[in-house]
């Protein structure tokens, strides 16, 4: 996102405390980013701008209904990105898109950037990845961290494309479970 995450986070925090004007501004800014995100993803697979508009509305509604789950101590854009991505995946499943058509994307266009957190995040990510089985860890590193396509990762790792996709998916679920355990007091 081009809008600073700190600004979006402050708008969200203000909205959570009852500032309706700040919340409207937040949703307006997010709608522009989400619309562009969905149009880019869907146009790659020959889908319409109308679908992107529908998905943007679904994502905004999900953000609104799940706003109580947002932790103001955390960056906002990864939380928004997760909702947006799951809405896209659900939509493609509902509309029976081929699994080969589902883009495995990097989140640079919507993720927050914070320079001083980078080193800590890399160290923490390394520790978490170290707890995964080798195939899952290597698939995630290739596709999500190195930015390789699934086909490139499959060739490099000597795996089939479906195996790479499955290992990325299962590895991300395992990482989410590990993070969930760490956050519990």
Image (tube, grey):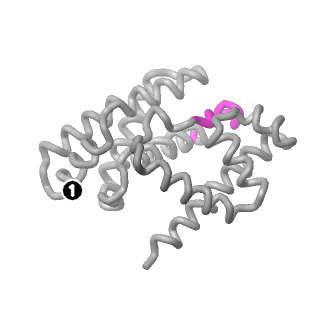
Question: Can you give x and y, in whole percent of width and height, for residue 163 in the image?
Answer: 79, 46
For label 1, count other residues whose C-alpha is less than 10 Å away and answer few (under 14), some (14-19) or many (20+).
Answer: some
Give, as a single range, the part of the protein colored magenta: 94-105
What's the magenta bit mostly, secondary-structure-wise?
loop
Q: Which of the 4 image quarters holds residue 5?
A: top left
Q: Which of the 4 image quarters holds residue 23?
A: top left
Query: Which residue corresponds to mark 1?
Result: 16
Q: Is residue 102 shown in magenta?
A: yes
Question: Can you give x and y, in whole percent of width and height, for residue 3 in the image?
Answer: 31, 33
In front of the other: 66 or 94:
66
Q: Is residue 83 shown in magenta?
A: no
Question: Can you give x and y, in whole percent of width and height, for residue 101 in the image?
Answer: 66, 30
Question: Can you give x and y, in whole percent of width and height, for residue 60 in the image?
Answer: 34, 42
| Placement of the N terminus among the 4 image quadrants | top left
Position above or below: 59 against 29: below
Position above or below: 171 against 183: above
Position above or below: 171 against 50: below
Circle 1 SS class? helix
Give the residue at x 12% y 50%.
19
């Amino acid at each position: 996102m081009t809008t600073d995450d700190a600004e979006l986070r402050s708008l969200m925090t203000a909205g959570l405390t009852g500032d309706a004007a700040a919340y409207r501004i937040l949703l307006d800014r997010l709608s522009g980013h989400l619309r562009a995100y969905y149009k880019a993803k869907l146009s790659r697979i020959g889908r319409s701008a109308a679908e992107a508009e529908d998905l943007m509305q679904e994502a905004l509604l999900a953000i609104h209904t799940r706003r109580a789950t947002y932790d103001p101590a955390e960056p906002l854009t990864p939380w928004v990105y997760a909702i947006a991505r799951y809405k896209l995946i659900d939509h493609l499943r509902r509309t029976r898109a081929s699994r080969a058509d589902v883009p495995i994307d990097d989140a640079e266009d919507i993720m927050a950037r914070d320079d001083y957190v980078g080193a800590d995040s890399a160290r923490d990510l390394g520790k978490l990845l170290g707890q995964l089985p080798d195939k899952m860890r290597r698939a995630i590193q290739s596709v999500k961290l190195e930015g390789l396509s699934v086909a490139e990762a499959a060739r490099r790792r000597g795996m089939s494309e479906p195996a790479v996709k499955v290992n990325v998916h299962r590895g991300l679920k395992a990482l989410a479970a590990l993070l969930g355990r760490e956050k519990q007091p």
